Amino acid sequence: MKKMSFAKGLLQALLLLPLAAMASEAEVHLDRAPVNFQDNESLQRGAAVFVNYCLSCHSASAMRYSRMTDIGLTEPQIKDNLLYATDKPGNTMTIAMNKKEAKVWFGAAPPDLSVITRSRGADWVYTYLRSFYRDDSRPTGWNNTVFDKVGMPHVLHELQGQMVPVYKTETDHEGKTHRVIERLELAQPGKMTLAEYDGLVADLVNYMTWMGEPAKSKREHVGIAVLLFLGIFFVVAFYLKKEFWKDVH
């Protein structure tokens, strides 16, 4: 009986784990990412930001540089402006950083970003990149309201500036008080205004979302065309059926 009760308790705990994870994520407010695959200029700007700021630590091994021709770039433009880690547009977006060394530096090897927006969601990534703040208790000097105790430093801080937290006091259901972050405020301006920085992050997330599934737009267009064909064919087939079976009825 004890074994049965233990197994039952373990099963219940495992079933409740996803619910607990969802509850913890629900506490974080996520801003809507302005994703638009039809905006090639935004995708091109996002690609430039990704190559200049993300590709030094993070790889995107499922993406080839040459695929950027789908967002309106020519191969000469890709070669002249985006090939910093390789010399061939047909190569994938890999990096030279050693994973073991990266783990020593950051506590964990930076993840591959090929499908990060499909894994985390575009809204999560968009909010995360705008939620870094100064925290001297962290090894990198940075923390994040979306990903607490994050190991990644704020590589875009020169553009955004330094944000600091503004705290408020909350009382939990047990009557205990806790200091929680109410909002972030700009303490030291960066090279961009906050609105300009939000626009840059929007372009970056737009590109990263497209990068996670470059064929999505084409697939959707083909799907719409197929549905239109089936709709027209249904009307034709319906009247043909009536014509062929009129004498039977």
Image (cartoon, rainbow, N blue to C red):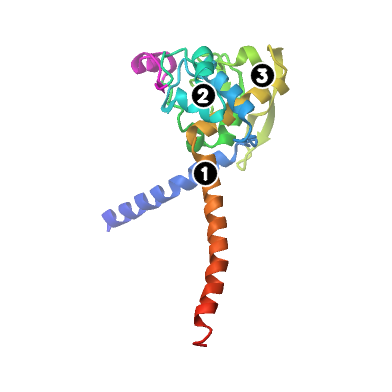
The one nearer the camera, 206 or 104, is 206
Q: Which residue is mark 2?
A: 149
Image-based side of 210 in relation to 168, left or right: left
Q: Earlier in the sequence, mark 3 or mark 2?
A: 2
Q: Which residues are magenta?
A: 90-107
Whole-percent x, y for residue 137 in the image: 54, 15
Residue 239 higher or lower than 42, as above or below: below
Q: Residues within 10 Å of mark 3 (few under 14, many from 20)?
A: many
Label 3 to label 2, Cα distance in Å? 15 Å
Q: Is residue 105 magenta?
A: yes
Where does label 3 land, which residue? Answer: 164
Residue 22, percent from left and from top: 52, 44
Dot 2: within a 10 Å radius of its alpha carbon, few (fewer than 14), some, or many (20 or more) residues?
some
Give residue 120's mark: none
Label 1 with label 2: CB-CB less than 8 Å: no
> Eyeballing the image, is 226 above or below 98?
below
Image spot of residue 76 (x, y percent): 51, 16
**Quarter of the image with the N terminus in it:** bottom left
Q: Which residue is mark 1?
A: 22
Element type where label 1 sits in the image: helix
Q: Amino acid at mark 1?
A: Met
Task: Check disc 3 and give the amino acid type.
Answer: Val
Q: Residue at image x 61%, y 22%?
A: 45
Estimate the x, y position of residue 136 in percent, counting from the top left: 57, 13
